[in-house]
Image (tube, helix red, strand yellow):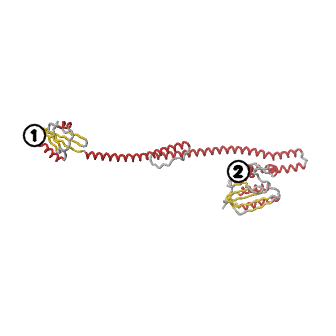
Amino acid sequence: EIEPFMRSRGYELARQIGQMAGTQVVIYDMKGQEIGNSSPGLSSTDVQDTLSYALQNKTSYQISRQSIYYLSPIIISEEQVGIVQFYYSLEKEYEFYNTIKGLFISVGSVIFIFSFILGYIYFGRMTNVILGLKLAVENVKLGKYKEVPELHRRDELGDLRQGIYYMSNQIEQSMEAMTMEQQKLTLAVEKLRTLEHQQRQFIGNVTHEFKTPLTVIKAYVDLMEMYPKDENLVNDAKVNISKETGRLYDMVDKTLQLAALEKYEFELEKQVILVDELLNEICSRMDGKVQKQGLYLYVDTKPVSVYADRESLFQVFINLIDNAIKYNNPKGKIYVKNYIQNDMVCIEIQDTGIGIPKESRELVFEPFYTVDKTRSRQFGGTGLGLALVRQLLEKQQGSISIVDTKEAGTTFIIKLPLYR
């Protein structure tokens, strides 16, 4: 019978099944009592709850700590006659699990820390870039257009930086253009005011200067009408009327020339001019007037050439030498010389006359300005000669100035580009 067989041979059966399975095997009968154990010395865990399920012809298992107990019905002729329990240790599985778990924790921690560092660096740099771009926008707002940070990126932040950079450049260029236009407008307004002032001053000077000789002429004409038989008066009137007429003619001529130079751009007939030959020619012409005034003229010229308008230079030198004669002292001296300095031809005309005060050295080049009005009228000066000289020189890229010297008198220096 099955039941006595199971009781008598249970331990042997458990041993053989255990050997085949390679694990501890326990056999129970239908009452739940142990009737066979392949390893009797091993302690077993209470499996009564699981056993009750197995007695109902069900396969069940129970996990206890690091062990698993598997219970399966024993069926003979379609009838359950007992239960076999297999034991399996999970120690290695738990050890493998703990190893994998530790590995995952270690690797995960390293990856987390590395990712955190990379993220911190990346987002820190990105934050710095964003803060830099924000500061750049603030600088643009404050008018500091060139303070845009350098940024070598090819992402959206790089595009944003390029946009801010180009925007700031465009704004800066627009502001510079506006500033330049404002400066031009300011200069234009100032120039208009200056021109208006000069125009009023010019008209006033012309009116005053023209009025003086006309008054003298009118006075002598009236006296001649009143005393037509006074020969002395008539002769004196002729001399003074002739003198004032010549002065008035010279004034009108220079005024027209000066006005024409300021208003129109005349085409100069430039040519290569030997400065030494031109100076010697003019000094020869003026020698008679120099001797008549009891003066001494010294000429020291060197061969040198300029590219300029001959008639303009002729008029310039004539004016300056004539002034040196008019405003010189008795037995005074006049020095005319030329030399080369820094690719410029320099012509000095020096006299030992009354001189020009420092505060008047720039004003003498203004129309109708005279240092000594009494002496200017005595010698027929109009205050237009030096203004005309400066205009003629500036038309040919030249200049004129008064230089300081230890000697008495006045020294004019003319500079013209050297022709090679």
Residue situated in front as seen by the camera: 341 or 261 = 341
Q: Residue furthest bottom?
A: 303
Locate residue 402, reporting x and y percent.
73, 54
User: Of marks 2 and 1, which one's residue comes earlier in the chain?
Assistant: 1
Residue situated in front as seen by the camera: 217 or 147 = 147
In the rendered image of this protein, does residue 399 appear above or below residue 144?
below
Query: Which amino acid type is shown beneath numbered disc 2?
Result: Leu
Q: From the image, state whether disc 2 or disc 1 is nearer to you.
A: 1
Neighbourhood count class around disc 1 (C-alpha, 10 Å): few under 14, some 14–19, many 20 upward: few
Locate residue 238, reporting x and y percent.
85, 50
Q: Quadrant of the N terminus?
A: top left
* Residue on which disc 1 sits: 4
Locate residue 126, reporting x and y percent.
45, 45
Query: Which amino acid type is shown beneath numbered disc 1?
Result: Pro
* Residue on which disc 2 sits: 261
In the rendered image of this protein, does residue 276 appear above or below residue 267?
below
- Is 56 on the left or on the right of 366, as rendered? left
Quick check: can you spot residue 14?
Answer: yes
